[in-house]
Amino acid sequence: RMRIRATTITNWDRKEYVIPNKEFITGRVLNWTLTDKTNRIVIHVGIAYGANVEQAKDRLLQICRDHPLVLEDPPPLVTLEGFGDNTLNLVVRTYLPDLTHRLSVTDELHTAFEADFREHGIEIAFPQRDLHIRSVDESVWKQMASGPPPA
C-alpha cells in the first residue's frame, strides 16, 4: 500500500516492510517484473571430487530441459565454477516464465537432481576430512593390528 509518507510492502514470508517514500526517489529499487516477468533460478550443486563432471552437467541440463515450466529460451546453463574444500561446485541457471511457481520448481529441480544423481552413481559431496597420523607409539599400532581388546 502506498501512502503519503511511506509504502508498505509484504514479502513472500508475509512480513511487512514500511519504507519511506523518499527511498523510492533517492535510493535504488529492484523490480523483478517491471518490463519482463521472466526470472532466473540459480541452484548450486556440489559433487564429489572424482565424479564425472561432464556427466553431471549433462544430467542437470536434461532435468532442466524436461521440466515443463523451464523455458527453452534462454536455455538452461550448467557451469563448473569452483573447487571447494569438499566439492566440485556446479551452478545451474535456468529461467521461468514468471514468479508464480518459483519455489515449487526450485524444490522439484532439487528433488530430481538428487534422485537422478543417485540413479546414475554421481555422488553429491559432503564435508569430510583426512586424518594424517605422524607419530604414534609402536605399542598402539600393535594393539590396533590385533583387533579390539577383549570385553
Image (cartoon, grey):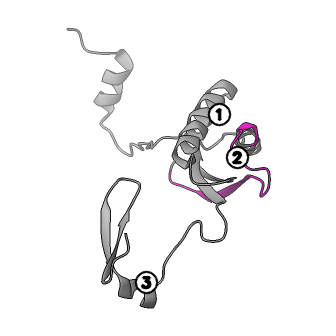
Q: Residue furthest bottom?
A: 26
Residue furthest to the top in view is: 151
Q: What residue type is labelled 1?
A: Ile
Looking at the image, which residue is at 79% across and 55% down?
Answer: 73
Residue drawn at x 25%, y 14% as measured from the top left: 149
Residue type beneath disc 3: Phe
Residue at the extreme left: 151
Drawn side of residue 150 relative to residue 39, left or right: left
Residue wearing tag 3? 24
Dot 3: element: helix
Among the two numbered marks 3 and 1 on one chain, the one whose residue lies closer to the N terminus: 3
68 up-or-down from 98: above or below: above
Q: In what quadrant of the picture does the N terminus appear?
A: bottom left
Label number found at residue 122: 1
Instruction: Give the percent coordinates (x, y) of residue 18.
Output: 30, 72
Does the residue at mark 3 contact the one at mark 1 (Cβ under 8 Å)?
no
Closest to the camera, between mark 2 and mark 1, is 2
In this view of the protein, can residue 129 be seen by the observer? yes
| The stretch drawn in magenta includes residue 124 | no
* Disc 3 from disc 2: Cα separation: 32 Å
Q: What residue type is labelled 2?
A: Val
Q: Position of residue 49 (x, y in %)?
A: 61, 44
Residue 37 percent coordinates (x, y): 64, 61
* Mark 3 neighbour density, 10 Å: few (under 14) some (14–19) many (20 or more): few
**Disc 2 to disc 1, how far (Cα)?**
23 Å
Q: In the figure, is residue 137 to the left or right of 113?
A: left
In the displayed structure, 21 sits above or below 56; it is: below
